Image (cartoon, helix red, strand yellow):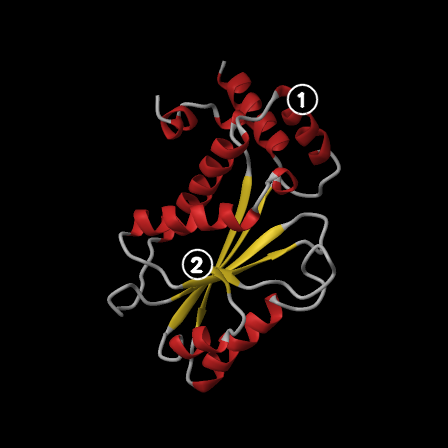
Amino acid sequence: MHALQRTQRLSQMRMRRVVVKVHIARANGGIGIRAYGRHLEYIQRDGVDRGGEGGELYSRDGEISDVRSFVERSRDDRHQFRIIVSPEDAHALSDMKASTRALMNQMERDLGTRLDWVAVDHHNTGHSHTHIVVRGKDAHGADLVIARNYLTKGLRARAEEGLTQELGPRRDVEIAQARYREVPQDRFTSLDRALAKRSIVGWSA
């Protein structure tokens, strides 16, 4: 059976978890265009790699030493997509760049167009993550429009599928450790969702 089919048949509990955040930045004249360049400078800031130096900007074909060409190509874009991908098990990945490239290749297949994108990995926080910037143009130069459902759910599902294929399904001990880490968190976690589901079932019974 194909690896993706096996992944899709896994219970959600066994899937590797990935947090994906998407922001659509819009250009309003020159200020917006300059903001595109400043954002790229920001995500390359000092202290983002494991060695404490500036992050390496990369794309599909390798590292990028000069961001000016990407900014120049974006000059007439009315918007750009800024994506943060944060795998729960980022520490276990042998190559975050390769994982990001695989995700972007899948995104291109889903959208049916080649994308112009750059990314940088951040390791200066307690949880490694990747910043991705996608131009707001498709392969034909038309405005790139992505369905809201794909941005809010579909891309995260693709990231989780890829991570699960790469690292394998979550083991019982990993699930238990993840739940233990959620106990002190001041947010609505999977524990809260499980308790809410049980309370609804109990009430209906």
Position of residue 66 relative to residue 56, above or below, is below
Measuring from the top left, give residue 108's x and y in whole percent: 34, 52
Residue with the most extreme bottom position? 30
- Front position in the image: 54 or 163: 54
Q: Which residue is mark 2?
A: 61
Q: Is residue 152 visible?
A: no
Asked if residue 138 lies left or right of residue 191, the reply is left
Position of residue 190 relative to residue 26, above or below, is above
Q: Is residue 123 visible?
A: yes
Q: Could you classify mark 1 by the number of other residues whose Cα lies within 10 Å: few (under 14), some (14-19), or many (20 or more)? A: few
Measuring from the top left, give residue 71's x and y in whole percent: 45, 76
> What secondary structure is marked by label 1?
helix
Q: Which residue is mark 1?
A: 173
Q: Hey, what amino acid is under mark 2?
A: Asp
Query: What residue is drawn where x is 43% and y is 62%?
Result: 117
> What secondary structure is marked by label 2?
loop
**Can you tell which of label 2 and label 1 is closer to the viewer?**
2
Query: What residue is drawn where x is 31% and y is 58%?
Result: 114
- Front position in the image: 68 or 65: 65
Q: Hey, what amino acid is under mark 1?
A: Val
Residue 61 occupies quadrant: bottom left
Measuring from the top left, give residue 14's x and y in whole percent: 53, 25
- Front position in the image: 203 or 169: 169
Residue 10 occupies quadrant: top left
Assess whether mark 1 and mark 2 are in contact (beta carbons under 8 angstroms): no
User: First in sequence: mark 2 or mark 1?
Assistant: 2
Q: Quadrant of the N terminus?
A: top left
Query: What residue is drawn where x is 32% and y is 67%?
Result: 137
Measuring from the top left, give residue 57's x and y in whole percent: 55, 64
